[in-house]
Image (cartoon, helix red, strand yellow):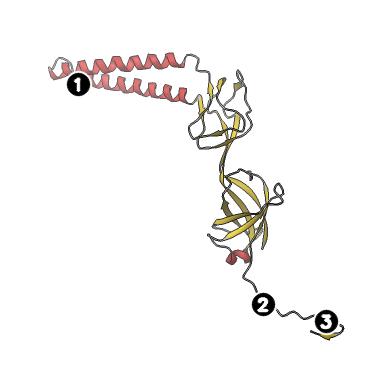
Amino acid sequence: LKAFGQMRAVQGADLSAQVPGIVDEIDFQSGQEVKAGTVLVRLRLYDDPAKLAQLNAEVALWTANLARDNKQFEAQAVSRATVDTDIATLRSYQAQAAAQSQAMDEKTIRAPYAGKLGIRQVDLGQYLPAGTPITSLQSLDPIYVDFNVAQQQIGELHPGGTVELHVDSWPDRRFTAEIIALDSRIDPASRMVSVRASLANADHALLPGMFATVRLDRGGPHEVRVQRLVEGVDA
């Protein structure tokens, strides 16, 4: 059984910033292997730290006000409305401080998972609109191969089965992959079903997007009777 497929990373994405800004720091090299959480790019913060400090000061102030008014309330020196106002004001500043901290954190782009980075597409001092690609990140080991087979051949495929791969980039190598899933539906237009197999790729020889020829042995060996003619006589 022969099919044509394409290599796909277990996890792969084009990384970008969620917010616009000026590139202030680049902490990676093209093609670098990174761990999850590695800082890749930092955008300029401008006065963001000062705004956060101001909000934290307000949080500290209203925390003290609330503590003082609680004591006054116990002594019946202030009303319950005063304490409620303190609580509402404190929570408001706490929420603003959390939002400001989150906005600052979004200006630091980190690797969401371990993998191999692609080509760097940004430079220091460059203005990045939100969503501008910075680089790609691909998890390459293991790697998937996705291929399609006709519906008549579904019975010959099952999770745990193996297939053999051939890619033009490595003509002398054969790769063995394990089928991990069949799609839950058949394409009504082509009557084909998608199949996914997984294989180890420690040397990163296979890359996402590579074209692959997939082969699956059908059945076992069969004994056949061969007849040949020698000088016109059956042998």
Q: Nearer the viewer, mark 1 or mark 3?
A: 3
Q: Residue at x 27, y 22 (%)?
A: 87
Q: In the displayed structure, would residue 202 be above or below residue 29?
A: below
Q: Secondary structure at mark 3?
A: strand
Q: Residues within 10 Å of mark 2 (few under 14, many from 20)?
A: few
* Residue at image location 41% in from the left, 17% down from the top: 52
Q: Amino acid at mark 3?
A: Leu
The residue mark sitting in front, 1 or 2, is 2
Residue 47 x %, y %: 47, 14
The residue tagged 1 is: 80
Q: Report the residue marked by disc 3.
A: 229
Cβ–Cβ under 8 Å for marks 1 and 3: no
Q: In this figure, which residue is indicated by the disc labeled 2?
A: 223
Q: Position of residue 30 (x, y in %)?
A: 62, 30
Quadrant location of the N terminus in the rendered image: bottom right
Marks 3 & 2, CB-CB < 8 Å contact: no
User: Disc 1 to disc 2, how far (Cα)?
Assistant: 94 Å
